[in-house]
Amino acid sequence: MEKIRIQKLLADAGYCSRRKAEALIEAGKVKLNGHPVKLGDKATYQDLITVSGERVYLSRKKSYRYIMLYKPRGYVTTTSDELERRCVMDLLTDVEERVYPIGRLDKDSEGLLLLTNDGKFANDIMHPSRHITKTYRVTIRPDITEDQLVALASGIELDGRKTLPANVVVKTREPGRVVLLMSIQEGRNRQIRRMCESLGLEVARLRRVSIGPLKLGMMKPGTYRDLTAEELRAIRNAIGKEN
């Protein structure tokens, strides 16, 4: 029987994304038939794979879910939290499948978050080579200069590496308040906030309004729904996949 890399088996099983599976393997939390594994190890669907002692049930046939959630502020983007903070998973009250978030939004940010149990789909969206554009509505206080706008659009050095150019548009400008639409093709940790903070800008509110062709629309905070067939085709086309 064909052997498959363990991180792919975990992702295909809907346990987590492939990237997360690799991190779990490197952390020594994954075992194959009772023995610790390393990156590159392979297994079959008949093998026993556990993560932190919990068995992962492998199946060739799987029912995939693709969910769009409006993450409210105050929730962390994890499947569980050691500090017992509110998690986005708490909002999925009637989802039977074991889904997980694709990427992150920090606790104080809100907006569009995708969740799935399709590991390959999640990995494709998160992979930097896909250049999936994410757009944010950013409220800045009290104002922003033209030089700061140019700097955001040109790229900001974070952790010794400059960010890719961003598309920055002033949506509204009022006394003490400016609303920007910022579009980026990266997913660094708290990237938008850190870019603004590096220029001395105060971010009063940050909301992700789109991921590729998928738009938040009129959804309310805390609500979720499955992607439509049309939306799923659109995002698959955006990541270069066949319909």
Image (cartoon, grey):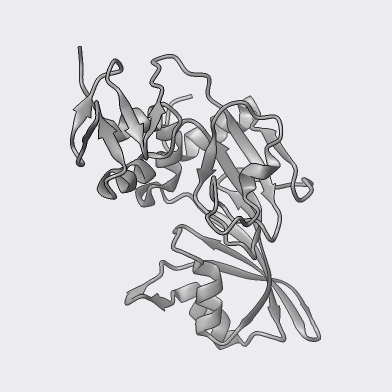
Image coordinates for residue 231, horizontal then vertical, percent: 61, 33
Image coordinates for residue 108, horizontal then vertical, percent: 64, 65
| Residue furthest top in the image | 1
Please tell me whether residue 77 is drawn above or below residue 199 in the rendered image.
above
Q: Quadrant of residue 125?
A: top left
Q: Determine the residue positioned at 71% across, 82% down.
A: 141
Depth check, front residue: 138 or 72? 72
Image coordinates for residue 62, horizontal then vertical, percent: 47, 18
Tell me: 46 left or right of 188. Answer: left
Please tell me whether residue 50 is drawn above or below residue 39 in the rendered image.
above
| Quadrant of the snapshot with the N terminus | top left
Image coordinates for residue 92, horizontal then vertical, percent: 67, 37
Depth check, front residue: 38 or 71? 38
**How many discs appear?**
0
Depth check, front residue: 66 or 157? 66
Please tell me whether residue 123 is drawn above or below residue 188 in the rendered image.
above
